[in-house]
Amino acid sequence: MSYQVNEKGYYGDFGGAYIPEMLYPNVEELRTTYLKIMNEPSFKEEFNQLLRDYVGRPSPLYFAKRLSEKYNTKVYLKREDLNHTGAHKVNNTIGQILVAKRLGKNRIIAETGAGQHGVATATVCALMGIQCVVYMGEIDIKRQAPNVARMKMLGAEVRPAKSGSKTLKDATNEAIRDWINNPVDTHYIIGSAIGPHPYPDMVTRFQSIISEEIKWQLKEKEGRENPDYVVACIGGGSNAAGTYYHFLDEPDVGIIAVEAAGKGVHSGESAATSQLGKEGIIHGCKTLLMQTPDGQITEPYSISAGLDYPGVGPLHSHLYKSGRGEFFSVTDDDAMTAGLELSQLEGIIPAIETSHALAIFNDKKFKPDDVVVISLSGRGDKDLNTYIDYFKL
Amino acid sequence: MNRINQKLAEDKKLLSIYFTAGYPSLHDTKKVIQDLEKSGVDMIEIGLPFSDPLADGPTIQESSTAALKNGMTTKLLFEQLKDIRQSVEIPLIIMGYFNPMMQYGVEAFCAKCKEIGIDGLIIPDLPVAEYHEHYQETFEKYGLINVFLITPQTSDERIRFIDNVSNGFIYMVSSASTTGAKNTFGGEQQQYFERIENLGLKNPQIVGFGISNNETFTQATKTTKGAIIGSAFIKHLTHNGVETIGAFVRGIR
C-alpha cells in the first residue's frame, strides 16, 4: 500500500483535481512545476535558510515530564507553537511564497479559518513585499479578532466571506472565486492539505519538515528514530500530514488522528468528518466530506475555528479507509479540559485545535514505555477569549 | 438525433437561458421552462442548485441558496420534470456541480435524464480528462451530450482536445471570471472570439458569462453560434417574478 500521491493526483480512491476549466491553467502550471521548483538547490537553500533564521526551526521536541507521569507513558510534544506566528502554518506559507515568486506571481490570496494560516500568509507576503488578500468567514472574523488585527497590521486585506455558513469552507469558496477572476497574476496559497492536486501533496511536503525533525530529535533523546505513536489534530489536516509524513511507510509507528466532535459526534453539531462523512467532492478534490444524502455540503461545528471544516485532506481519507490511521473524535468539552490541563501541567497554553490532540488520553491507553509524539500545532494566544468565556476565568 | 444537435443545425443564432431550479419559488421550475419556450428561447439550462457553487458569482449563488432553502433536491427536480416533454420541445440541459450527481449515482442520474428527455449536461467541476476516462461511456449510453467550458486562458492544444471529446457545442466562457461578474465586452474578448473562430473547431461555440442584454448578445454571437444568459435572467426573476419572462426575452433579440 502506498501513501504517496500517484501520478494522477490520487491517494488510493481520494484526491484528483475537480476544478472548473477557469482554474485549469493555474493548477496545471503548478502540477507540472511544483516538484521541479522544490528540488532546485537554490529553492532548498532559500527555504531552509528562512525556516532556520526567520521561523526559528528546528522546533524543539520537548519531553513533557508531568504529562507523561500523569498518563503513565512517555509523551513528547513537537513544539510547532514556538514557530514565528505561533503555529505550523508558516512552514507551508514560506514554501508557497517561494514557489509563487518563481512562477512570477505578484498577488497572493488565501483562505483562513482560525486566522493562523491568514497570519502566516500575511507574514510571508510582508516579508517578500507582495500584495495579500485573505478571505475569512464572517463568523470567524468575530471569534478570532486578534488574528484579524495581526493580518491588517501586516498589511493584508481581510475580506469577509458572507456566503453559506460564513466559516472556513465559505472562505475557501471565495478564495477560489477570486482566483477564477484573477488567473494570471495571482497565486492561491491553500493552507491545508486539501484542494485540487497538487495542493495536498505540496502542502504535505512543506509540512513534512515536522516529521523529518522528529526523527533525528527522537534519535538523540531515545536512541531511535521511530516513536510508537504520532498524534495530531485534523481539520483539513496539514499539521497531521506533516507529522505523519516520514512515518507513513513505517508500520511500527501508529498514526493517530483526532477530529473535532463538537458537541458530540451525533449531536448534529460536529466536525468529525471520518465518522460523519461520505465520499464526495469539495474544493477540487474527492475525499470524505460531511453532506446531505442529496450531496449538499453541510455546515460543520467545532469550538475551534481551525477544525471547523466539513472535509478532510485526501491523504487522511486514504489513511482512514485503508486502516493505516486510527481516528478519534474529541468533544469541545474534552478538548477545553485538555487545553487547561496542559497549561497547568507544563506551562504551555495550546491552541484549541491542538487541545483536541491532547485529549487523546481519554480515549486511548498507552503503555508505560510507549513513546508518543503529539504535534503541538499552535499556541493558544488567539483563543484566550474562548478559554476565558468557557472557564469563566 | 439529439435535440441539441438538431437545434445547432438550424440557421440562426441561438439564445440559451440558464435558471436555477426551484427559484424564485420551489414549484416555478416547470412554468419557467414553458414560458421560456413560448417566448422563443432556443435552449434551456436548468440549474441543479448546489451548496458550494465555486464557479458562480453572487447572483447564482444566492438563487442556489434560496432554491435549496425552498426545498429543492435532485429527486424533486426529476419529479417536477417528469412530464416536461409533453409540453416542451426545445433542448433541455441540466447544469450542476458534480457532487450531487455523484451522490445520486452517475449512472442512475444519466438514466433518469434519458427517461425524462434531458438532452445534455454541463458540469463545471468535472474535468474533461476525468470525464473521458470514467464517465463518457455512461453519458453516451444514455444519449447525453456533455458540454465543456473553455476560457480565454485555455490553450489551443487543450481546446482541440475538448473539441475532440465534445459532440454538441463548446461553452465559451467570455472572460476570466465567475458568472455575472462582468457586463461589457472589450478588445480582449474580441481577440479571443477571433482566435477561437480561426481554430475551425468541429463543434459550434456558444458564449456564456457576461451576456445580459441585446448589445452583448449581438457582440457575442457575431462569430459564434449563440449565447447563454444566466445571472441577468436570475436578476430579472428576483425583481419581476415569473410573470414577465416574455418581456425579458424580447429585450434580448
Image (cartoon, grey):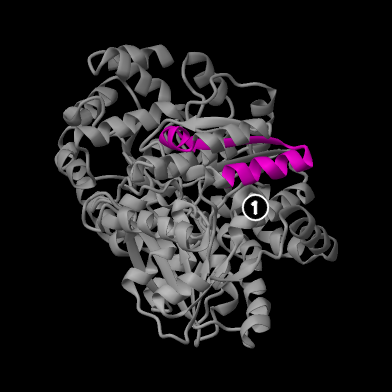
- Number of callouts in the render? 1
Nearest the eye: B67 or A330: A330
Q: Please, which chain is the residue tagged with disc 1 on?
A: A
Q: Residue A83: horizontal and vertical position, in percent?
A: 65, 55
The residue located at (29%, 56%) in the rendering is B103
Query: Circle 1 — which element?
Result: helix
The residue located at (51%, 63%) in the rendering is A346
Amino acid at circle 1: Val
The residue located at (26%, 52%) in the rendering is A263
- Report the residue marked by disc 1: A90
A163 displayed left or right of A133: left
Q: Residue B28: horizontal and vertical position, in percent?
A: 20, 27
Q: Residue A311: horizontal and vertical position, in percent?
A: 40, 55
Q: Please identify the dominant SS of the magenta region.
A: helix
A201 displayed left or right of A308: right
Give the answer, above or below, for where A145 lies relative to A268: above
* Boundaries of the magenta span: A117-144
The residue located at (53%, 45%) in the rendering is A381
Nearest the eye: A242 or A289: A242
Q: Residue A338: horizontal and vertical position, in percent?
A: 39, 60
Q: Is residue A118 magenta?
A: yes
